Amino acid sequence: MPLSAPQPREHIHTREITCTGYRRADGLWDIEGHLIDTKTYAFHNDERGDVPPGVPVHEMWIRITVTDRLEIMEVEAATDYSPFALCRAVTPNIQRLVGLRIGPGWRDRALAKVGGVEGCTHIVELLAPVATTAFQTIFPIKNREQPKTSAPSDTPPRLLNTCHAFRSDGAKVKEIWPNFYEGPET
């Protein structure tokens, strides 16, 4: 177990999020997100009646189809389980994401289109892991398929300063992208 041993406790709720990336035959990419919330106990819902343990409280799906540049060409969302029947009414609003590009400012642009009363909190929550899944799906494949050039690029790598490992003054940047290293020379 990667975490330390916990204090005595009772399992109450599980949220599972799965995101999967696919390369399509037409050159586009499908990224699918799936969210399921379950309880370990039975509860009553005014619209659904008695909900047994393990039956989803929420189960939502989203599929975005993107280009190599992460522009959204198609989007589809579905709600299999929700607390209220009216939750499904906002699913068509997800179409508003078509034309947006995943990149800097993505979250704010997406929320402007489908956030708040215009969307479903749970489908909107899937947008962040779906976006990172798109990066993890597309860029390693594109990098593997590009011919290697020996000349250093003057364009900063997309990952520069996105985390501790890729900080511009760190050892990994000095090793991988030495022309973008900004730390002390040793």
Image (tube, grey):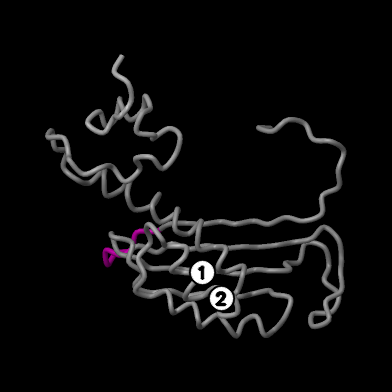
Rounded to the nearest angstrom, the CA distance separating label 2 from label 1 is 7 Å
**Tags 2 and 1 in contact by the CB under 8 Å rule?**
yes
| Numbered range of the magenta stretch | 22-28
Q: Position of residue 59 (x, y in %)?
A: 65, 68
Q: Amino acid at mark 1?
A: Ile
Secondary structure of the residue carrying tag 2 is strand
Q: Is residue 16 magenta?
A: no
Identify the residue at horizontal 57%, vertical 77% (top origin).
119
- Left or right for 185, reference 38: left
- Left or right for 19, reference 102: right
Residue 7 in which image quadrant: top right
When the figure is inspected, residue 47 is found, relative to residue 154, above or below; the finding is below
Q: Amino acid at mark 2?
A: Ala
Q: Label 1, on which residue?
A: 62
Residue 3 in which image quadrant: top right
When the figure is inspected, residue 119 is found, relative to residue 137, above or below; the finding is below
When the figure is inspected, residue 163 is found, relative to residue 75, above or below; the finding is above
